[in-house]
Image (cartoon, rainbow, N blue to C red):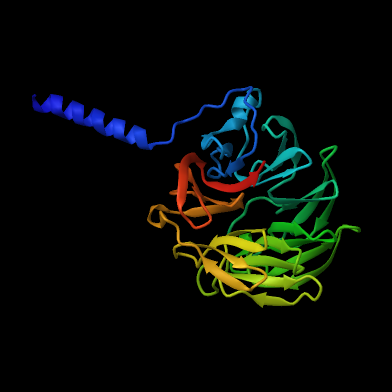
Amino acid sequence: MNIKTRHILLTALIAAVAASCRQPEVVPTEDLKFEHGIFVLNEGNMGSNKASIDFYDPKQDTLYRNIYPTVNPTVVKELGDVGNDIQIYGGKLYAVINVSGKVEVMDLNARRIGQVDIPNCRSICFEDGYAYVSSYAGPIDYGNPDYKQRGYVAKVDTATLTVEDTCLVGFQPNGICSDGRYLYVANSGGYMAPKYDSTLSVIALESFKEEKKITVAINLDAVAYDPERKTVFVSSLGDYGTHPAELYSVRTETAEVKPMGFAVSKMQIADGKLYYYGGEFGSKAEVGFYDLKKGEKHVVELSNADQLTTVYGIFVTDGDWYLTDARDYVTPGVLYRYDGNGRLKSKHRTGDIPGHMCVK
């Protein structure tokens, strides 16, 4: 056997081994229907118009990539530019598409129902038939400490998909949640560094007016509400230097603010626990949960921790943990599925910058 023949056979063998380890690519069809599973919203790099939705079926351990253009072949620009949030409410799927300035509304098979135009929109929550969407309101303008445009929350009728009203809040509002009586909106001032905003806006749902602002910390981002303890948890990203990132608790009845002693990038409250990943800027992300009843933090050791590059999203359901890895932000990411002890069950290639998940 000559050297050239050996090289061809070796190359074929390597390719066969790699293929056997790789999860099969699944191409969605236009009539595909999804049962129980996880919708994954991939952000895509700003300006690339590559926001996309994947669907993971845990029973079949199958991920369907980029389902939106397949089931919506007549939508010209597909999903749009920069996916920022995804939620299900009232039998509809809502995807917040930041730079495209819209909330895309779909059925639970990702077929388009319509859209709501909201400029520079960021996050969404729901209450009593309405969607509430945080918006920077003004144009994208990073690094402008003299930025003048305050953000707002848009009140959207989920039956008609129309904006009924808006309520001014602070600068560059990000996360938003509801306790049934009030909305809590994390104002970041992210465009205005180093003059960050540091307030949590409190909006009464009945009047849809901002009743007060609670000073928490600079550059606020994600929020989550714990109904048992009537507490809003809000993350501060700090200034990526002098002021460290940290998670804070805010008692809704007293407006008392307390630092939690650890940093959170994204979080989810479920089953009496606050699940999170996060860490100080420039450090490796920590994954774990905070027991809300016991007041104890637990770090989860992942079986493949050395394989993770850029943890970017977290979601927990049915006893399993789902983490997304954005990797280098320009190539496809990865969805990892773990059991409750951090043991890897499977992994799948996703779209670019997978960051947001919801369960069907």
Q: In this view, does 66 lie to the left or right of 3?
A: right
In the rendered image, residue 91, in percent from the top left (x then y), is placed at: 76, 38
Residue 9, picture quadrant: top left
| Vertical arrangement, residue 210 with respect to residue 326, above or below | below
Q: Nearer the viewer, residue 117 or 310?
A: 310
| Vertical arrangement, residue 42 with respect to residue 213, above or below | above
Residue occupying the far left of the picture: 2
Q: In this view, does 29 lie to the left or right of 253?
A: left
Residue 254, picture quadrant: bottom right
Q: Is residue 193 visible?
A: yes
Q: Can residue 239 be seen in this view?
A: no
| Vertical arrangement, residue 162 with respect to residue 172, above or below | above
Quadrant of image for the C terminus? top right
Tell me the residue at 71%/69% (across/down): 199
Q: Which of 137 and 12 is in front in this view?
A: 12
Tell me the residue at 67%/77% (across/down): 258
Quadrant of image for the N terminus? top left
